[in-house]
Amino acid sequence: MTEGTPRVAERISTGIPGLDTVLHGGLRKARTYMLLGLPGSGKTIFANQLCFHHASRHGGRVLYLTLLAESHTELVGNLSSLSFFDPTLLPNAITYLSAFTVLEQGGLDALAELIRKETKNHQATLLVLDGLVAAEEVAPSQQAIKKFIHGLQVVTGLMGCTTLILTTGRGQGLRAEHTMVDGLLLLKQRMFGARAVRELFVRKFRGSPYLLGKHSFDITQDGLVVYPRLEVLAESGPPPGPPLEAKCALGIPGLDTMLSGGVPQGSTTILLGPPGSGKTLLGLNFLAEGARRGERVHYFAFYDSPERMVAQAAGIGLDLKPLIDRGDFEVSFRPPTENLLDKLGVQLLDVIRTHGVRRLFLDGYDALRRAAIRMPRVSRFLAALVNECRMRGVTLLYSVEAAAAFGPEVAFPMKGISMVAENVLFLRQAELDSELRRFVTVLKLRNSPHDLALRELRISSNGMEVTGTFTGVESMMTGLPRTTARSEPRHPGGGHQGT
Protein backbone atom coordinates (compact mmCIF):
# COMPACT_ATOMS: atom_id res chain seq x y z
CA MET A 1 0.00 0.00 0.00
CA THR A 2 1.49 3.34 -1.01
CA GLU A 3 1.28 6.51 1.04
CA GLY A 4 -2.01 8.27 0.48
CA THR A 5 -3.85 5.10 -0.60
CA PRO A 6 -7.05 4.63 1.44
CA ARG A 7 -6.80 1.74 3.87
CA VAL A 8 -9.40 -0.95 3.26
CA ALA A 9 -10.81 -2.07 6.61
CA GLU A 10 -10.74 -5.81 7.22
CA ARG A 11 -14.20 -7.31 7.42
CA ILE A 12 -15.67 -10.01 9.60
CA SER A 13 -18.44 -11.99 7.94
CA THR A 14 -21.49 -12.32 10.17
CA GLY A 15 -22.66 -15.68 8.85
CA ILE A 16 -26.21 -14.30 8.74
CA PRO A 17 -27.56 -14.64 5.18
CA GLY A 18 -28.36 -11.24 3.72
CA LEU A 19 -26.79 -9.21 6.54
CA ASP A 20 -23.34 -9.01 4.93
CA THR A 21 -25.09 -7.65 1.84
CA VAL A 22 -26.76 -4.95 3.95
CA LEU A 23 -23.41 -4.12 5.61
CA HIS A 24 -21.42 -4.22 2.36
CA GLY A 25 -19.25 -7.11 3.53
CA GLY A 26 -19.82 -7.54 7.26
CA LEU A 27 -18.57 -5.94 10.46
CA ARG A 28 -15.31 -4.00 10.51
CA LYS A 29 -12.57 -5.64 12.53
CA ALA A 30 -11.76 -4.29 16.02
CA ARG A 31 -14.80 -1.99 16.05
CA THR A 32 -17.62 -1.82 18.59
CA TYR A 33 -21.24 -2.38 17.59
CA MET A 34 -24.51 -2.24 19.48
CA LEU A 35 -27.54 -4.42 18.76
CA LEU A 36 -30.86 -3.13 20.12
CA GLY A 37 -34.11 -4.99 20.40
CA LEU A 38 -36.90 -5.80 22.81
CA PRO A 39 -37.05 -9.29 24.39
CA GLY A 40 -37.99 -11.84 21.73
CA SER A 41 -36.70 -9.78 18.81
CA GLY A 42 -33.83 -12.22 18.06
CA LYS A 43 -30.79 -10.54 19.66
CA THR A 44 -29.44 -13.69 21.35
CA ILE A 45 -29.79 -15.83 18.22
CA PHE A 46 -28.18 -13.06 16.14
CA ALA A 47 -25.19 -12.85 18.50
CA ASN A 48 -24.66 -16.61 18.79
CA GLN A 49 -25.02 -17.16 15.06
CA LEU A 50 -22.25 -14.61 14.62
CA CYS A 51 -20.14 -16.32 17.29
CA PHE A 52 -20.37 -19.84 15.86
CA HIS A 53 -19.69 -18.58 12.34
CA HIS A 54 -16.69 -16.58 13.54
CA ALA A 55 -15.24 -19.58 15.36
CA SER A 56 -15.93 -22.21 12.71
CA ARG A 57 -15.29 -20.29 9.48
CA HIS A 58 -12.72 -17.70 10.56
CA GLY A 59 -10.95 -19.76 13.20
CA GLY A 60 -11.59 -16.96 15.69
CA ARG A 61 -11.85 -17.14 19.46
CA VAL A 62 -15.03 -15.87 21.07
CA LEU A 63 -15.79 -14.63 24.57
CA TYR A 64 -19.53 -14.43 25.28
CA LEU A 65 -20.01 -12.51 28.51
CA THR A 66 -23.48 -12.25 30.02
CA LEU A 67 -24.76 -9.72 32.53
CA LEU A 68 -28.11 -11.44 32.89
CA ALA A 69 -29.34 -13.96 35.45
CA GLU A 70 -30.02 -16.64 32.79
CA SER A 71 -27.76 -19.67 33.26
CA HIS A 72 -25.44 -20.72 30.47
CA THR A 73 -26.82 -24.24 30.63
CA GLU A 74 -30.24 -22.85 29.76
CA LEU A 75 -28.79 -20.59 27.05
CA VAL A 76 -26.86 -23.42 25.39
CA GLY A 77 -29.87 -25.71 25.67
CA ASN A 78 -32.02 -23.21 23.78
CA LEU A 79 -29.39 -22.88 21.05
CA SER A 80 -28.81 -26.60 20.59
CA SER A 81 -31.84 -27.00 18.31
CA LEU A 82 -30.42 -24.53 15.75
CA SER A 83 -28.35 -25.86 12.84
CA PHE A 84 -25.39 -23.52 13.40
CA PHE A 85 -24.82 -24.82 16.96
CA ASP A 86 -21.66 -26.95 17.21
CA PRO A 87 -20.88 -28.33 20.69
CA THR A 88 -17.30 -29.18 19.67
CA LEU A 89 -16.50 -25.44 19.68
CA LEU A 90 -17.26 -25.25 23.41
CA PRO A 91 -15.47 -24.21 25.58
CA ASN A 92 -12.17 -23.63 23.73
CA ALA A 93 -13.19 -21.65 20.65
CA ILE A 94 -16.31 -20.18 22.28
CA THR A 95 -16.32 -19.43 25.99
CA TYR A 96 -19.43 -18.40 27.91
CA LEU A 97 -18.81 -16.43 31.08
CA SER A 98 -21.25 -14.86 33.53
CA ALA A 99 -20.37 -11.43 34.93
CA PHE A 100 -23.65 -10.96 36.76
CA THR A 101 -22.16 -11.38 40.23
CA VAL A 102 -19.09 -9.27 39.45
CA LEU A 103 -21.28 -6.43 38.21
CA GLU A 104 -23.63 -6.69 41.18
CA GLN A 105 -20.84 -6.66 43.76
CA GLY A 106 -18.16 -4.46 42.15
CA GLY A 107 -20.04 -2.24 39.73
CA LEU A 108 -18.77 -0.96 36.38
CA ASP A 109 -15.11 -0.76 37.39
CA ALA A 110 -15.01 -4.43 38.36
CA LEU A 111 -16.82 -5.37 35.16
CA ALA A 112 -14.33 -3.39 33.04
CA GLU A 113 -11.41 -5.10 34.73
CA LEU A 114 -12.97 -8.55 34.20
CA ILE A 115 -13.49 -7.84 30.47
CA ARG A 116 -9.89 -6.65 30.07
CA LYS A 117 -8.51 -9.69 31.87
CA GLU A 118 -10.68 -12.37 30.22
CA THR A 119 -10.39 -10.92 26.71
CA LYS A 120 -6.60 -11.06 27.06
CA ASN A 121 -6.55 -14.54 28.65
CA HIS A 122 -8.78 -16.05 25.94
CA GLN A 123 -7.07 -14.07 23.15
CA ALA A 124 -10.55 -13.24 21.98
CA THR A 125 -11.09 -11.87 18.50
CA LEU A 126 -14.82 -11.42 19.11
CA LEU A 127 -16.45 -10.25 22.34
CA VAL A 128 -20.18 -10.31 22.96
CA LEU A 129 -21.51 -8.37 25.95
CA ASP A 130 -25.07 -9.54 26.51
CA GLY A 131 -27.28 -7.36 28.71
CA LEU A 132 -26.00 -3.79 28.81
CA VAL A 133 -29.29 -2.81 30.44
CA ALA A 134 -28.07 -4.51 33.64
CA ALA A 135 -24.94 -2.33 33.63
CA GLU A 136 -27.09 0.78 33.10
CA GLU A 137 -29.18 -0.12 36.15
CA VAL A 138 -26.16 -0.18 38.50
CA ALA A 139 -24.40 2.80 36.92
CA PRO A 140 -24.35 5.87 39.18
CA SER A 141 -24.84 8.20 36.19
CA GLN A 142 -25.14 8.35 32.42
CA GLN A 143 -21.61 9.70 32.33
CA ALA A 144 -20.39 6.51 34.01
CA ILE A 145 -21.93 4.39 31.24
CA LYS A 146 -20.26 6.54 28.58
CA LYS A 147 -16.92 6.18 30.38
CA PHE A 148 -17.38 2.39 30.60
CA ILE A 149 -18.14 2.03 26.87
CA HIS A 150 -15.23 4.28 25.95
CA GLY A 151 -12.88 2.17 28.05
CA LEU A 152 -14.27 -1.01 26.48
CA GLN A 153 -13.63 0.39 22.99
CA VAL A 154 -10.04 1.30 23.85
CA VAL A 155 -9.19 -2.10 25.35
CA THR A 156 -10.79 -4.27 22.66
CA GLY A 157 -9.52 -2.00 19.89
CA LEU A 158 -5.91 -2.38 21.08
CA MET A 159 -6.37 -6.16 21.19
CA GLY A 160 -7.87 -6.26 17.69
CA CYS A 161 -11.10 -7.66 19.12
CA THR A 162 -14.48 -6.89 17.53
CA THR A 163 -17.19 -6.16 20.10
CA LEU A 164 -20.97 -6.61 19.96
CA ILE A 165 -23.09 -5.16 22.77
CA LEU A 166 -26.66 -6.39 23.22
CA THR A 167 -29.27 -4.20 24.88
CA THR A 168 -32.99 -3.54 24.89
CA GLY A 169 -32.51 0.22 24.54
CA ARG A 170 -35.04 0.59 27.38
CA GLY A 171 -37.47 2.29 25.00
CA GLN A 172 -35.96 5.74 25.58
CA GLY A 173 -34.97 6.57 22.01
CA LEU A 174 -31.46 7.63 21.04
CA ARG A 175 -29.11 7.69 24.04
CA ALA A 176 -25.60 9.05 24.52
CA GLU A 177 -23.94 5.62 24.37
CA HIS A 178 -25.55 4.99 20.99
CA THR A 179 -23.52 7.82 19.50
CA MET A 180 -20.23 6.37 20.79
CA VAL A 181 -20.28 2.98 19.11
CA ASP A 182 -19.19 2.38 15.50
CA GLY A 183 -22.44 0.80 14.45
CA LEU A 184 -26.02 0.66 15.69
CA LEU A 185 -28.35 -2.12 14.51
CA LEU A 186 -32.00 -2.41 15.53
CA LEU A 187 -34.21 -5.50 15.54
CA LYS A 188 -37.94 -4.90 15.74
CA GLN A 189 -41.06 -7.03 15.68
CA ARG A 190 -44.12 -5.14 14.50
CA MET A 191 -47.77 -6.11 14.42
CA PHE A 192 -49.85 -5.36 11.32
CA GLY A 193 -53.31 -6.52 12.23
CA ALA A 194 -52.94 -10.16 13.22
CA ARG A 195 -49.62 -10.46 11.41
CA ALA A 196 -46.18 -10.15 13.03
CA VAL A 197 -43.28 -8.93 10.89
CA ARG A 198 -39.63 -8.75 11.91
CA GLU A 199 -37.44 -5.93 10.57
CA LEU A 200 -33.77 -5.00 10.78
CA PHE A 201 -32.62 -1.39 10.52
CA VAL A 202 -29.04 -0.08 10.45
CA ARG A 203 -29.11 3.34 12.09
CA LYS A 204 -25.37 4.00 11.75
CA PHE A 205 -22.29 2.20 10.45
CA ARG A 206 -19.11 4.24 10.60
CA GLY A 207 -16.50 4.13 7.87
CA SER A 208 -18.56 2.15 5.36
CA PRO A 209 -21.62 2.45 3.15
CA TYR A 210 -24.60 0.22 3.94
CA LEU A 211 -28.08 -0.44 2.58
CA LEU A 212 -30.55 2.08 3.93
CA GLY A 213 -34.07 1.38 5.12
CA LYS A 214 -35.88 -1.43 6.90
CA HIS A 215 -35.11 -4.99 5.83
CA SER A 216 -37.32 -7.95 6.72
CA PHE A 217 -35.86 -10.99 8.42
CA ASP A 218 -36.96 -14.44 9.53
CA ILE A 219 -35.89 -16.59 12.45
CA THR A 220 -35.60 -20.11 11.10
CA GLN A 221 -34.08 -23.44 12.10
CA ASP A 222 -30.83 -22.10 10.63
CA GLY A 223 -30.99 -18.85 12.61
CA LEU A 224 -31.64 -15.39 11.24
CA VAL A 225 -32.09 -14.79 7.52
CA VAL A 226 -32.15 -11.16 6.38
CA TYR A 227 -33.89 -10.11 3.16
CA PRO A 228 -32.49 -6.79 1.86
CA ARG A 229 -35.06 -4.59 0.16
CA LEU A 230 -35.29 -5.10 -3.59
CA GLU A 231 -35.38 -1.33 -4.14
CA VAL A 232 -31.79 -0.96 -2.90
CA LEU A 233 -30.49 -4.20 -4.44
CA ALA A 234 -31.79 -3.87 -7.99
CA GLU A 235 -29.75 -2.39 -10.80
CA SER A 236 -30.16 1.34 -11.30
CA GLY A 237 -29.42 3.60 -14.21
CA PRO A 238 -30.71 3.71 -17.77
CA PRO A 239 -31.24 0.28 -19.34
CA PRO A 240 -29.48 -0.65 -22.55
CA GLY A 241 -31.76 -0.16 -25.55
CA PRO A 242 -32.42 -3.44 -27.41
CA PRO A 243 -32.80 -3.31 -31.20
CA LEU A 244 -36.31 -2.25 -32.16
CA GLU A 245 -36.72 -5.39 -34.28
CA ALA A 246 -35.97 -7.75 -31.37
CA LYS A 247 -39.32 -9.32 -30.44
CA CYS A 248 -40.39 -12.15 -28.12
CA ALA A 249 -43.22 -14.11 -29.67
CA LEU A 250 -45.92 -15.41 -27.34
CA GLY A 251 -46.54 -18.50 -29.45
CA ILE A 252 -50.30 -17.91 -29.83
CA PRO A 253 -51.61 -17.74 -33.40
CA GLY A 254 -53.24 -14.39 -34.07
CA LEU A 255 -51.92 -12.69 -30.94
CA ASP A 256 -48.37 -12.41 -32.27
CA THR A 257 -49.88 -10.93 -35.42
CA MET A 258 -51.68 -8.32 -33.32
CA LEU A 259 -48.35 -7.48 -31.67
CA SER A 260 -46.42 -7.31 -34.95
CA GLY A 261 -44.37 -10.35 -33.96
CA GLY A 262 -44.55 -10.25 -30.18
CA VAL A 263 -43.60 -8.01 -27.27
CA PRO A 264 -40.27 -6.15 -27.45
CA GLN A 265 -37.35 -8.07 -26.00
CA GLY A 266 -36.42 -6.88 -22.51
CA SER A 267 -39.77 -5.16 -21.99
CA THR A 268 -42.39 -5.71 -19.28
CA THR A 269 -45.99 -6.63 -20.04
CA ILE A 270 -49.05 -6.61 -17.79
CA LEU A 271 -51.70 -9.26 -18.42
CA LEU A 272 -54.80 -7.57 -17.02
CA GLY A 273 -58.06 -9.44 -16.67
CA PRO A 274 -60.57 -11.05 -14.29
CA PRO A 275 -60.38 -14.69 -13.15
CA GLY A 276 -60.94 -17.15 -15.97
CA SER A 277 -59.92 -14.78 -18.74
CA GLY A 278 -56.82 -16.81 -19.68
CA LYS A 279 -53.96 -14.84 -18.07
CA THR A 280 -52.07 -17.83 -16.65
CA LEU A 281 -52.42 -19.92 -19.80
CA LEU A 282 -51.22 -17.01 -21.93
CA GLY A 283 -48.18 -16.61 -19.66
CA LEU A 284 -47.38 -20.31 -19.90
CA ASN A 285 -47.55 -20.13 -23.70
CA PHE A 286 -45.14 -17.19 -23.59
CA LEU A 287 -42.66 -19.25 -21.54
CA ALA A 288 -43.08 -22.40 -23.61
CA GLU A 289 -42.39 -20.47 -26.82
CA GLY A 290 -39.16 -19.16 -25.32
CA ALA A 291 -38.08 -22.61 -24.14
CA ARG A 292 -38.77 -24.06 -27.59
CA ARG A 293 -36.42 -21.41 -28.98
CA GLY A 294 -33.65 -22.51 -26.61
CA GLU A 295 -34.13 -19.73 -24.04
CA ARG A 296 -34.16 -20.41 -20.32
CA VAL A 297 -37.50 -19.36 -18.84
CA HIS A 298 -38.98 -19.24 -15.34
CA TYR A 299 -42.51 -19.50 -13.97
CA PHE A 300 -42.70 -17.69 -10.58
CA ALA A 301 -46.00 -19.00 -9.26
CA PHE A 302 -48.26 -18.44 -6.26
CA TYR A 303 -51.52 -20.14 -7.17
CA ASP A 304 -50.76 -23.47 -8.85
CA SER A 305 -48.26 -26.07 -7.74
CA PRO A 306 -45.90 -27.39 -10.47
CA GLU A 307 -47.97 -30.57 -10.81
CA ARG A 308 -51.25 -28.68 -11.24
CA MET A 309 -49.63 -26.23 -13.63
CA VAL A 310 -48.34 -29.03 -15.86
CA ALA A 311 -51.75 -30.71 -15.84
CA GLN A 312 -53.51 -27.41 -16.61
CA ALA A 313 -51.21 -26.77 -19.56
CA ALA A 314 -51.69 -30.32 -20.83
CA GLY A 315 -55.43 -29.66 -20.88
CA ILE A 316 -54.92 -27.19 -23.73
CA GLY A 317 -52.41 -29.37 -25.58
CA LEU A 318 -49.33 -27.65 -24.12
CA ASP A 319 -46.80 -30.33 -23.10
CA LEU A 320 -44.39 -28.65 -20.70
CA LYS A 321 -42.80 -31.74 -19.14
CA PRO A 322 -40.07 -32.22 -21.81
CA LEU A 323 -39.13 -28.54 -21.51
CA ILE A 324 -38.98 -28.82 -17.71
CA ASP A 325 -37.00 -32.08 -17.82
CA ARG A 326 -34.26 -30.61 -20.00
CA GLY A 327 -33.95 -27.58 -17.69
CA ASP A 328 -35.07 -24.80 -20.04
CA PHE A 329 -38.42 -24.30 -18.28
CA GLU A 330 -37.96 -23.60 -14.55
CA VAL A 331 -40.81 -23.53 -12.04
CA SER A 332 -40.83 -22.14 -8.51
CA PHE A 333 -43.90 -22.14 -6.30
CA ARG A 334 -44.77 -20.57 -3.00
CA PRO A 335 -48.29 -20.69 -1.48
CA PRO A 336 -50.04 -17.29 -1.32
CA THR A 337 -50.06 -17.24 2.48
CA GLU A 338 -47.98 -14.91 4.70
CA ASN A 339 -45.14 -14.23 2.30
CA LEU A 340 -42.62 -11.45 2.93
CA LEU A 341 -42.25 -8.99 0.07
CA ASP A 342 -38.51 -8.65 0.70
CA LYS A 343 -38.09 -12.43 0.69
CA LEU A 344 -39.87 -12.63 -2.66
CA GLY A 345 -37.58 -9.87 -3.94
CA VAL A 346 -34.46 -11.81 -2.97
CA GLN A 347 -35.85 -14.92 -4.70
CA LEU A 348 -36.70 -12.98 -7.87
CA LEU A 349 -33.23 -11.43 -8.04
CA ASP A 350 -31.70 -14.88 -7.62
CA VAL A 351 -33.78 -16.17 -10.56
CA ILE A 352 -32.74 -13.24 -12.75
CA ARG A 353 -29.06 -13.03 -11.79
CA THR A 354 -27.95 -16.62 -11.22
CA HIS A 355 -30.30 -18.74 -13.35
CA GLY A 356 -29.67 -16.91 -16.62
CA VAL A 357 -33.36 -16.68 -17.52
CA ARG A 358 -34.41 -14.71 -20.59
CA ARG A 359 -38.16 -14.83 -19.97
CA LEU A 360 -39.94 -14.52 -16.61
CA PHE A 361 -43.64 -14.90 -15.86
CA LEU A 362 -44.75 -13.62 -12.44
CA ASP A 363 -48.20 -14.95 -11.64
CA GLY A 364 -49.35 -12.64 -10.10
CA TYR A 365 -49.40 -9.10 -8.78
CA ASP A 366 -52.08 -9.72 -6.16
CA ALA A 367 -49.82 -12.09 -4.22
CA LEU A 368 -47.16 -9.35 -4.09
CA ARG A 369 -49.74 -6.91 -2.79
CA ARG A 370 -50.79 -9.30 -0.02
CA ALA A 371 -47.13 -9.86 0.92
CA ALA A 372 -46.58 -6.12 1.40
CA ILE A 373 -47.27 -4.65 4.82
CA ARG A 374 -47.08 -1.13 3.40
CA MET A 375 -49.17 -0.80 0.22
CA PRO A 376 -47.26 2.17 -1.29
CA ARG A 377 -44.16 -0.06 -1.47
CA VAL A 378 -45.60 -2.40 -4.07
CA SER A 379 -45.28 0.03 -6.98
CA ARG A 380 -41.70 0.92 -5.98
CA PHE A 381 -40.89 -2.78 -5.62
CA LEU A 382 -42.25 -3.49 -9.11
CA ALA A 383 -40.44 -0.51 -10.59
CA ALA A 384 -37.14 -1.82 -9.20
CA LEU A 385 -37.87 -5.33 -10.52
CA VAL A 386 -38.79 -3.96 -13.95
CA ASN A 387 -35.58 -1.94 -14.18
CA GLU A 388 -33.51 -4.97 -13.14
CA CYS A 389 -35.10 -6.97 -15.97
CA ARG A 390 -34.48 -4.16 -18.46
CA MET A 391 -30.83 -3.88 -17.46
CA ARG A 392 -30.33 -7.61 -17.96
CA GLY A 393 -32.43 -8.04 -21.08
CA VAL A 394 -35.05 -10.22 -19.36
CA THR A 395 -38.55 -10.09 -20.85
CA LEU A 396 -41.08 -9.99 -18.01
CA LEU A 397 -44.80 -10.76 -17.97
CA TYR A 398 -46.91 -10.52 -14.85
CA SER A 399 -50.59 -11.08 -14.32
CA VAL A 400 -52.86 -8.55 -12.65
CA GLU A 401 -56.38 -9.46 -11.62
CA ALA A 402 -59.03 -6.94 -12.66
CA ALA A 403 -61.43 -5.88 -9.93
CA ALA A 404 -64.61 -6.87 -11.79
CA ALA A 405 -65.41 -9.53 -14.35
CA PHE A 406 -68.35 -7.54 -15.75
CA GLY A 407 -69.32 -3.89 -15.65
CA PRO A 408 -68.62 -0.59 -17.37
CA GLU A 409 -65.37 0.21 -15.57
CA VAL A 410 -61.86 -1.11 -16.22
CA ALA A 411 -59.75 -0.08 -13.24
CA PHE A 412 -56.02 -0.58 -12.85
CA PRO A 413 -55.10 -1.78 -9.35
CA MET A 414 -51.96 0.41 -9.23
CA LYS A 415 -50.95 3.92 -10.18
CA GLY A 416 -48.09 4.90 -12.46
CA ILE A 417 -48.48 2.14 -15.05
CA SER A 418 -45.72 3.59 -17.23
CA MET A 419 -43.27 3.07 -14.37
CA VAL A 420 -44.02 -0.64 -14.01
CA ALA A 421 -44.75 -1.80 -17.60
CA GLU A 422 -44.27 -0.79 -21.21
CA ASN A 423 -47.06 -3.02 -22.51
CA VAL A 424 -50.60 -3.88 -21.34
CA LEU A 425 -52.74 -6.70 -22.72
CA PHE A 426 -56.36 -6.73 -21.58
CA LEU A 427 -58.31 -10.00 -21.42
CA ARG A 428 -62.00 -10.26 -20.58
CA GLN A 429 -65.15 -12.31 -20.92
CA ALA A 430 -68.41 -10.93 -22.27
CA GLU A 431 -71.87 -12.41 -22.65
CA LEU A 432 -72.85 -12.59 -26.29
CA ASP A 433 -75.78 -14.55 -27.69
CA SER A 434 -76.25 -16.24 -24.28
CA GLU A 435 -72.65 -17.41 -24.34
CA LEU A 436 -69.49 -16.25 -22.59
CA ARG A 437 -66.89 -15.21 -25.14
CA ARG A 438 -63.31 -14.28 -24.33
CA PHE A 439 -61.53 -11.46 -26.09
CA VAL A 440 -58.13 -9.78 -25.95
CA THR A 441 -56.98 -6.31 -26.91
CA VAL A 442 -53.75 -4.34 -26.72
CA LEU A 443 -54.15 -1.33 -24.45
CA LYS A 444 -50.52 -0.33 -24.76
CA LEU A 445 -47.43 -1.46 -26.68
CA ARG A 446 -44.58 0.99 -26.46
CA ASN A 447 -42.56 1.89 -29.56
CA SER A 448 -44.17 -0.75 -31.74
CA PRO A 449 -47.09 -0.85 -34.22
CA HIS A 450 -49.97 -3.03 -33.07
CA ASP A 451 -53.55 -3.99 -33.81
CA LEU A 452 -56.12 -1.93 -31.85
CA ALA A 453 -59.01 -4.33 -32.48
CA LEU A 454 -60.82 -6.46 -29.90
CA ARG A 455 -60.32 -10.03 -31.04
CA GLU A 456 -61.78 -13.28 -29.82
CA LEU A 457 -59.54 -15.46 -27.66
CA ARG A 458 -60.39 -19.15 -27.94
CA ILE A 459 -59.13 -21.75 -25.49
CA SER A 460 -59.64 -25.42 -26.28
CA SER A 461 -57.91 -28.77 -25.91
CA ASN A 462 -55.95 -27.80 -29.03
CA GLY A 463 -54.50 -24.69 -27.41
CA MET A 464 -55.05 -20.94 -27.43
CA GLU A 465 -55.92 -18.99 -30.56
CA VAL A 466 -56.79 -15.38 -31.29
CA THR A 467 -59.24 -15.10 -34.18
CA GLY A 468 -61.37 -12.35 -35.69
CA THR A 469 -63.15 -9.27 -34.43
CA PHE A 470 -66.84 -9.07 -33.50
CA THR A 471 -69.21 -7.51 -36.04
CA GLY A 472 -72.45 -5.84 -35.12
CA VAL A 473 -71.44 -5.51 -31.49
CA GLU A 474 -70.61 -2.50 -29.34
CA SER A 475 -69.51 -1.93 -25.72
CA MET A 476 -67.48 -5.15 -25.56
CA MET A 477 -64.94 -3.49 -23.24
CA THR A 478 -67.60 -3.08 -20.57
CA GLY A 479 -68.20 -6.82 -20.47
CA LEU A 480 -71.87 -6.01 -21.20
CA PRO A 481 -71.99 -5.77 -25.00
CA ARG A 482 -74.97 -4.76 -27.06
CA THR A 483 -75.73 -6.54 -30.34
CA THR A 484 -76.72 -4.43 -33.31
CA ALA A 485 -76.66 -7.37 -35.75
CA ARG A 486 -75.77 -11.03 -35.58
CA SER A 487 -72.31 -11.20 -34.03
CA GLU A 488 -69.79 -13.26 -35.86
CA PRO A 489 -66.04 -13.07 -35.53
CA ARG A 490 -64.25 -12.16 -38.70
CA HIS A 491 -60.72 -13.15 -39.53
CA PRO A 492 -57.61 -11.25 -38.41
CA GLY A 493 -56.36 -8.55 -40.70
CA GLY A 494 -59.24 -6.13 -40.41
CA GLY A 495 -57.83 -4.35 -37.34
CA HIS A 496 -56.18 -0.97 -37.22
CA GLN A 497 -52.51 -0.33 -36.76
CA GLY A 498 -51.23 2.10 -34.17
CA THR A 499 -48.24 3.01 -32.10
Image (tube, rainbow, N blue to C red):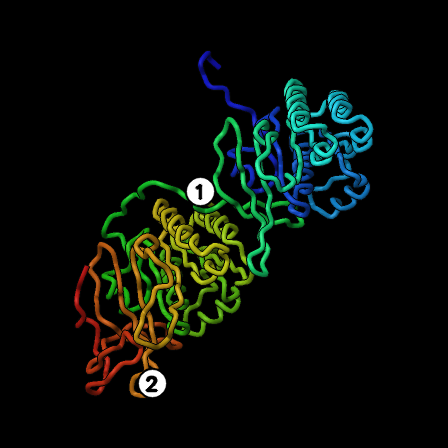
Compared across the picture, whether 450 is left or right of 276 comes to left
Which one is in front in this view, the residue at disc 1 or the one at disc 2?
A: 1
Mark 1 or mark 2: name the one nearer the start of the chain: 1
Is there CB contact under 8 Å for labels 1 and 2? Answer: no
Q: Is residue 336 visible?
A: yes
The quarter in which the C terminus is drawn is bottom left
Name the amino acid type tagged 2: Glu
Front in this rendered view, residue 32 or 436: 32
What residue sits 78% from the left and 23% below the top? Answer: 110
Cα distance in 3D space between marks 1 and 2: 49 Å
Image mark for residue 452: none
What residue sits 77% from the left and 31% below the top? Answer: 95
Compared across the picture, whether 244 is left or right of 290 comes to left
Front in this rendered view, residue 310 or 345: 345
Residue 267, compared with residue 431, is above or below; it is above
Residue 244, compared with residue 178, is above or below; it is below
Residue 22 in the image: state x and y as whole percent.
52, 38
Q: Identify residue for label 1.
A: 232
Q: Identify residue for label 2.
A: 435
Question: Judging from the image, what secondary structure is the residue with disc 2 in?
Answer: loop
Residue 260 in the image: state x and y as whole percent.
23, 61
Name the amino acid type tagged 1: Val
